[in-house]
Image (cartoon, grey):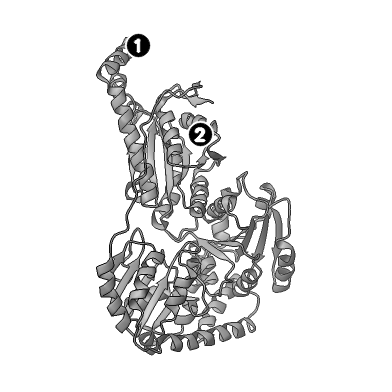
């Protein structure tokens, strides 16, 4: 087997293997050649080559999102690692384990005018859970920093260093730092950064490892004992007549069905779920905005909970955030292994366990709730909203709203849906998702920049077929995502093209002015036809309901190439149709 001749490169690659990191996304470069040699010559690793580092970062994030295991990205020095930053921040807030391995110049070559050189140490600041800044031979660094480098100095450095055992010390330090970083990625389920300096020559190889890393074992984390707190909270829960459970981003099957069945039996419990919660039951309340947007002050007071229990990750609905900030609960408890956001400014308990473990312990202790009509009252309103939702669809013309209705209805059975940010995820939230569909969206920072790349990364490792729905600006912004040799043939993209950022038309502002069209909505006349041709996608475009229905009949048929369906909708009508919807269902 071929290895890099550089011991530091061997150490990084070997320890990644020790920590069971299998997927390695490499962006071509020179300074990272020692790592590339090591990863690509070991069959243990599945290596991918993605040229654009921003796309590579989100591609890796999509893989880690699906596998729930650390995924590594490898880049050269300079601005390359800055292009990972959007994916790093998304991984940080979405709690996705991403490992950034950046090659760097040696310390004596920083800030002397060399190209592709920046200050890489701790470059991601507080957006990573650990920054490991590895070291080269310290004595050689000192000698090379002198203005006059004489070959005899290097020979002397080797001898002195061997005598003092400095190299063994540096090797041990590097191993410790790598272990800490990779361990942190797992224990925090988030991004870490390992900065690796290499001196030339970079391409020399050997056939045997020259390092012997010390054994390492990931520590076992114990669940905190929260029995006494649960006893206290269960009494509060039993005596409350209005208990609201709000569920954000969750991996599929995070809560066992029998646990959910027990929770919904409580007539004082209303469960509001986001589309990204992947939670289904006939007695829960998907479509949060559909339920609460039409409410007046009296309605909000009737929904205001005494106890708010939040599960999962970040929330899409701005309306539910505003509601719970204005009509605060008496208690807010959050259940999450990692962190708790005080989104509604009344958080008083954080249980650092998984929702399923918590509910299994908590529900048996809170099994004697007081009588309440809370759930039945709101189920009646929910069912009314659903009937009006269908009525409204029968009254409106072709628009973003009708398109989402058709698309979501026609998704392949037992498949995965990846959704772009901004208006795409908000429209999706208005519809009741089928139980056989699992949904993902980059809601950590809610950016549009890497949605396509994430969806493609997810499709590469997903056992389910993946459909990606996105808006036009998000799609064109991340068009380099298609510059990718790993896209499955059954991957499908649906682009809603309303010729600009249509979501800004539903926000307060002066619509239909040159200033608004240019600087807010960002009007354009682009289409995805040429991009599809260049990157080998089968392309179809439609402009009305009938054409969309016909296109969807064959869109998911077996093909030798991935497919892209572009749906052109009327930009000046979508906002009115959406705003009128909330009036209609009230």
Task: Identify the disc placed on residue 244.
Answer: none
Judged from this view, the residue extending furthest toward the front is: 364
Could you tell me if residue 119 is visible in this image? no
Q: Does 2 sit above or below residue 510?
A: above
Task: List x then y, in percent, for residue 499.
Answer: 59, 64
Q: Which residue is under mark 1?
A: 151
Task: List x then y, in percent, for residue 316.
Answer: 45, 68
Task: List x then y, in percent, for residue 269.
Answer: 40, 81
| Residue at 53% over, 75% down | 430
Q: Does 533 sit above or below residue 247?
A: above
Instruction: Give the quadrant of the N terminus.
Output: top right
Q: Which residue is under mark 2?
A: 39
Could you tell me if residue 260 is visible in this image? yes
Image quadrant assignment for residue 13:
top left
Mark 1 Cα shell of 10 Å, populated few (<14), some (14-19), many (≥20):
few
**In the foreground, 580 or 81:** 81
Task: List x then y, in percent, for residue 465.
Answer: 63, 58
């Amino acid at each position: 087997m071929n290895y890099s001749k550089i011991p530091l490169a061997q150490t990084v690659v070997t320890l990644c293997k020790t920590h069971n990191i299998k997927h390695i996304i490499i962006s071509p470069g020179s300074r990272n050649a020692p790592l590339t040699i090591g990863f690509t010559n070991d069959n243990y690793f599945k290596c991918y080559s993605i040229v654009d580092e921003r796309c590579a970062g989100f591609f890796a994030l999509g893989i880690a999102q699906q596998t729930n295991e650390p995924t590594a990205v490898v880049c050269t020095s300079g601005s390359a690692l800055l292009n990972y930053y959007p994916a790093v921040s998304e991984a940080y807030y979405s709690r996705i384990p991403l490992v950034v391995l950046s090659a760097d110049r040696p310390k004596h070559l920083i800030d002397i005018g060399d190209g592709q050189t920046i200050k890489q140490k701790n470059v991601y600041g507080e957006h990573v859970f650990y920054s490991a800044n590895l070291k080269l031979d310290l004595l050689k660094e000192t000698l090379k920093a002198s203005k006059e480098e004489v070959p005899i100095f290097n020979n002397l450095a080797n001898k002195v260093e061997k005598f003092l055992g400095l190299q063994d010390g540096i090797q041990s330090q590097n191993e410790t730092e790598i272990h800490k970083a990779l361990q942190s990625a797992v224990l925090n389920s988030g991004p870490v950064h390992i900065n690796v300096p290499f001196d030339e020559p970079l391409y020399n190889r050997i056939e045997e490892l020259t390092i012997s890393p010390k054994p390492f074992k990931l520590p076992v984390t114990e669940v905190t004992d929260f029995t006494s707190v649960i006893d206290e909270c269960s009494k509060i829960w039993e005596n409350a007549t209005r208990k609201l459970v709000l569920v954000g981003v969750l991996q599929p099957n995070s809560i066992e069905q029998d646990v959910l069945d027990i929770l919904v039996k409580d007539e004082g419990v209303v469960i509001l779920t986001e589309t990204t919660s992947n939670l289904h039951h006939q007695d829960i309340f998907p479509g949060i905005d559909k339920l609460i947007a039409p409410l007046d002050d009296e309605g909000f007071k009737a929904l205001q909970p005494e106890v708010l229990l939040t599960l999962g990750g970040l929330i899409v609905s701005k309306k539910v955030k505003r509601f719970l900030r204005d009509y605060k609960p008496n208690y807010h408890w959050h259940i999450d292994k990692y962190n708790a956001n005080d989104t509604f400014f009344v958080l008083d308990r954080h249980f650092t366990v998984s929702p399923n473990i918590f509910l299994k312990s908590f529900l048996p202790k809170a099994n004697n709730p007081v009588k309440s009509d809370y759930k039945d009252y709101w189920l009646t309103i929910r069912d009314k909203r659903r009937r009006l939702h269908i009525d409204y669809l029968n009254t409106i013309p072709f628009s973003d709203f009708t398109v989402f209705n058709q698309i979501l209805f026609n998704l392949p059975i037992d498949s995965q849906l990846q959704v772009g940010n901004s208006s795409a995820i908000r429209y999706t939230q208005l519809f009741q998702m089928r139980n056989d569909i699992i949904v993902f969206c980059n809601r950590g920072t809610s950016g549009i920049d890497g949605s396509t790349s994430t969806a493609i990364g997810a499709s590469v490792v997903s056992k389910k077929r993946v459909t990606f729905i996105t808006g036009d600006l998000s799609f064109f912004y991340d068009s380099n995502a298609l510059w990718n040799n790993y896209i499955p043939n059954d991957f499908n993209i649906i682009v809603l093209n309303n010729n600009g950022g249509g979501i800004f038309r539903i926000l307060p502002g002066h619509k239909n002015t040159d200033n608004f069209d240019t600087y807010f909505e960002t009007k354009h006349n682009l289409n995805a036809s040429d991009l599809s041709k260049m990157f080998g996608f089968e392309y179809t475009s439609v402009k009305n309901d009938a054409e969309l229905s016909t296109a969807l009949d064959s869109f998911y048929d077996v093909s030798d190439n991935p497919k892209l369906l572009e749906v052109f909708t009327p930009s000046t009508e979508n906002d009115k149709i959406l705003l009128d919807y909330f009036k209609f269902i009230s």
